[in-house]
Amino acid sequence: MTTITDALVAFLRARLDETEATALAVPTIEGTVPPAHFKQSTWPKDEGKVLMGTAADFPVPTAEHAAHIAAHDPASVVADVAAKRTLLAFHWTHIASTDEGERPGCVVCGYVTGAGCPTLLALASAYAEHRDYDRSWALPL
């Protein structure tokens, strides 16, 4: 029988795998290894340009747009995925004593039993628009 926690972990692992694969698929400069790293041009005449380090750089509507894109480049996305995978790993690394004996739990929030680990629910909330997201995973208000 699959528990809510098992389903959440499977859902999150699948989303993180998809996100990482997309980031790693972005082309890099010949001779470099993924992930690609973007940056915003610092030349005044290039305001609003993202330097991709691949083919042609590209203009964007504003310098703020360029800063946002550069801050979410493939290298940053891969680092974010790694951090979220670490949180998933912490989930079952704690052994808690309960009335039912010792059970695995979440180091981050102390979750052992119930409607769902708040840490996992929070991570899953970022994917609330995904077709496989279960609305029962929504964080309580």
Image (cartoon, helix red, strand yellow):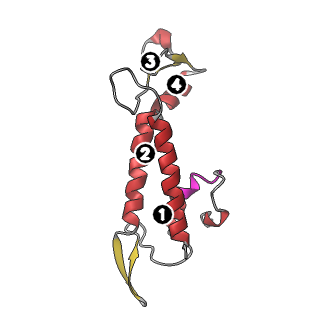
Label 2 CA crowd tier, 10 Å (few <14, some 14–19, many 20+): some
Is residue 126 highlighted in magenta?
yes
Tag of residue 66: 4
Q: Residue furthest front?
A: 1
Q: Residues within 10 Å of mark 4 (few under 14, many from 20)?
A: many
- On screen, residue 114 above or below 22: below
* Residue for badge 3: 41
Q: Which residues are magenta?
A: 124-129
Query: What's the mark number on residue 119?
Result: 1
* Element class at badge 4: helix
Tell me what residue is drawn at x 39 percent, y 43 percent.
79
**Residue placed under numbered mark 2 in the picture:** 80
Spatial CA distance of label 4 from label 1 is 32 Å
Check disc 1 and give the amino acid type. Answer: Thr
Location of residue 51 (image quadrant): top left
Q: Amino acid at mark 4?
A: Ala
Task: Judge the density around disc 1: few (<14), some (14-19), many (≥20) Cα neighbours within 10 Å.
Answer: some
- Asked if the residues shown at circle 4 and circle 3 are in contact, with their CB atoms under 8 angstroms apart, the answer is yes
Q: Determine contact: label 1, label 3, CB under 8 Å.
A: no
Query: Where's the C terminus, which quadrant?
Result: bottom right
Q: Earlier in the sequence, mark 4 or mark 1?
A: 4
Three-letter amino acid code at the position of disc 2: Asp
- In the displayed structure, would residue 37 be above or below residue 121? above
Circles 3 and 2 in contact, beta carbons < 8 Å: no
